[in-house]
Amino acid sequence: MREPLVIGVGNTLRGDDGVAAQLLSSWHDAPDVLLVPQLTIDLAPIIAQHPAVLIVDAAVCLAPGEWTLEKVRGCASTHSAFGHELNPGELIAVTEALFGAIVDVDLLCIGAQQFDRADTLSPAVTQVLPDVLDTVREWWAARADAQPETTTLLE
C-alpha cells in the first residue's frame, strides 16, 4: 500500500488561491504531494492508489486566515454537464465507482480574501501558514504510521 497523498489545489497567479502551493512547497521533506489547478476526474486513478488523501484548498466561505480540517464523504454530482472540475465529494464518489477504492479523504480549507492577479498571499493567510503546515505534517504522520507493515517471503 502506498503512502498517504496530499493534493494542493489552486492557481498560484491568483493571490490567496495559490495558498496550497505555497504551503506545500515550504514542506521541504514532503512525501507524496501533488499540486493541481483544480480537481478533475483525471485524479481518480491516482487517488485510488492511496489509503488516505488530504486536499488543501483556499476557501471564500471562511474568514481570511481561518482554516478548517474535515472529513470528505462521496456525494452525487451537483455540477452541470458543462463543468470540468469536481468538488471533493464528487471526486471521491467517482473514485469509488470507477475503481472500487474506499479512500479516507480529508479537506483542509484556508479562508482567503485576495484573488486578484498576484503571486503573493494576503497577510492574514500568510500568518497562519506555519500552524497549518504543522497540521498537515501531523495529518500525514498519523496516516503513514497507521499503514500495515508488509513483508516479503523469500524462498
Image (spheres, rainbow, N blue to C red):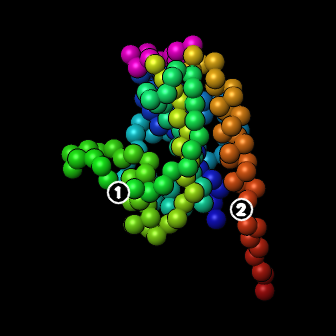
Quarter of the image that includes the C terminus: bottom right
In this rendering, would 51 be left or right of 11?
right
* Residue 64 drawn at (x, y percent): 52, 20
Q: Name the residue located 63 percent from the left edge and 18 percent from the top edge.
A: 127
Cα gap from disc 1 to disc 2, whole angstroms = 29 Å
Type of the residue with mark 2: Gln
Choose the circle earlier in sequence order: 1 or 2.
1
* Residue 52 drawn at (x, y percent): 60, 55
In this rendering, would 42 be left or right of 24?
left
Location of mark 1 (residue): 76
Near-viewer residue (130 or 37): 130
110 versus 50 height, above or below: above
Magenta stretch: helix, strand or loop mostly: loop
Q: What is the span of residues highlighted in magenta in the rendered image?
A: 114-123
Q: Name the residue located 57 percent from the left edge and 57 percent from the top edge.
A: 104
Callout 1 touching callout 2 (CB < 8 Å): no
Q: Is residue 22 visible?
A: no
Classify residue 152 by image quadrant: bottom right
**Which mark identifies residue 60?**
none
Q: Which label sits in the foreground, 1 or 2?
A: 1
Magenta stretch: includes residue 74: no
Q: Furthest-bottom residue in view?
A: 155
Type of the residue with mark 1: Ala
* Residue 50 drawn at (x, y percent): 57, 59
Q: Please rate how many residues cluster around mark 1, counting C-alpha atoms within 10 Å: few if below 14, some from 14 to 19, many from 20.
A: few
Q: Is residue 138 visible?
A: yes
Near-viewer residue (93 or 11): 93
126 versus 22 height, above or below: above
- Secondary structure type for disc 1: loop
**Which mark identifies residue 147?**
2
